[in-house]
Amino acid sequence: MLMNHATVIKSTGSWYLLKDTQTKVVYEARIRGKFKKEKIRNTNPLAVGDNVDYALEDNNIAWITNIYARKNYLIRKSVNLSKETQILASNIDLACIIFTLKNPQTSLGFLNRFLITCEAYQIPVLIAINKIDLLASEDSQQELKEIEEIYQKTGYQTLEISADKMININLLKEKIKNKTTVFLGHSGSGKTSTINALQPDLELKTASVSDYNDKGKHTTTFAQMFDWDFGGHIIDIPGIKEFELVDVDKEELQDYFPEIFKEKQHCKFSNCLHINEPGCAVVKAVADGRISEKRYQNYLKLLKELGK
Ligand SMILES: Nc1nc2c(ncn2[C@@H]2O[C@H](COP(=O)(O)OP(=O)(O)OP(=O)(O)O)[C@@H](O)[C@H]2O)c(=O)[nH]1
Ligand SMILES: [Mg+2]
Ligand SMILES: [Zn+2]
């Protein structure tokens, strides 16, 4: 049996698709029990983006013989099995949230938890605000600008797009060219539509949000990686309702808010959690308007959830 190298391009949890690194041939693949046991804490031992070795058997099924260490990965707590975690994608250069203010609404809490996870796992991020064609009213415009200001001030890149109306799709293309990017967001936020806008010949299946409910109907059911014809790869994943933090404790939470991390060196006490301690530079920065009140309140809320 010859040993070959490939990337996992689709994961259903029970079987996988691999793309051979050299020949680009795609094989259906299986994984043996021993890998399942080794990575028991994850609901999926193998994630899209993983690099593997495989052996091809007579029936053309690829058996995975080795999983290489991951450069990074995007992880969350699984909803059904509360103690287990799910790796959404691995070996990524850019995590792009497809954020929507409307239809469906993405909460800032969801956005913050996504950003914290990316900080913790050192994954560069882009906030793409999709469906801006629905934000023509003055109120929506004001809300949009306020959110962009908060996140830009914190150092995050935002980009207004519309997959349906092809707004700023070329700008998005420039940012993701020659990278492996993952699109993440609620069901119905337009992840797949954005992929189709970037490369129409992929013709991926999308579905209307309005004829189901506000959370969408999970048109994409499995994570899958595609090649861009302009260079790089995209991982499309199913919509996510909740994004729970994994392995973040209350002392390190502050380090994943870049604006808090920056100010905390000026706090009087080195173990300051920035709640109401005397001489807290973070509390002062919030009062002075250098740190967004909304972000700070979210920090306190998460701190409480983590057991403070
Ligand atoms: N008005 C408007 N509608 C959009 C835009 N982008 C996507 N949509 C619509 O939103 C609906 C859902 O889009 P999808 O691309 O299937 O959403 P998804 O994020 O892939 O959803 P899941 O696969 O379920 O996670 C479709 O009806 C799209 O036409 C946009 O920029 N503006
Ligand atoms: Mg989709
Ligand atoms: Zn402090």
Image (cartoon, helix red, strand yellow):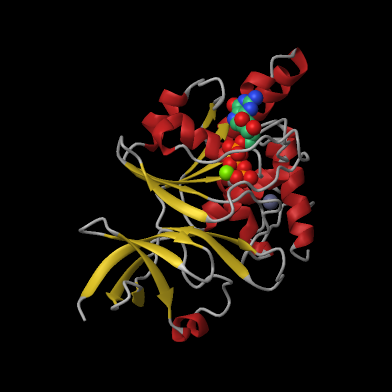
> In the displayed structure, would residue 207 be above or below residue 224?
above
Task: Determine the image quadrant of residue 13.
Answer: bottom right
Q: Which residue is drawn at 51% across and 85% down?
A: 37
Q: Which residue of the protein is positioned furthest toward the front in this rendering?
A: 59
Q: Quadrant of ligand 2?
A: top right
User: Residue 296: percent from the left, percent from the top?
Assistant: 72, 43
**Which residue is depicted at the point 20% across and 59% down?**
22
Position of residue 156 relative to residue 57, above or below, is above
- Position of 223 with respect to 274 (left or right) is left
Residue 194: x and y in percent read 51, 34
Left or right of 161 on screen, residue 249: right
Q: Position of residue 64 (x, y in %)?
A: 36, 75
Tell whether 301 sits left or right of 120.
Answer: right
Q: Quadrant of the N terminus?
A: bottom left
- x and y percentages locating residue 291 in the rendered image: 66, 36
- Please name the residue shown 33% across and 69% down the image: 52
Q: Which residue is drawn at 42% across and 25% down?
A: 171
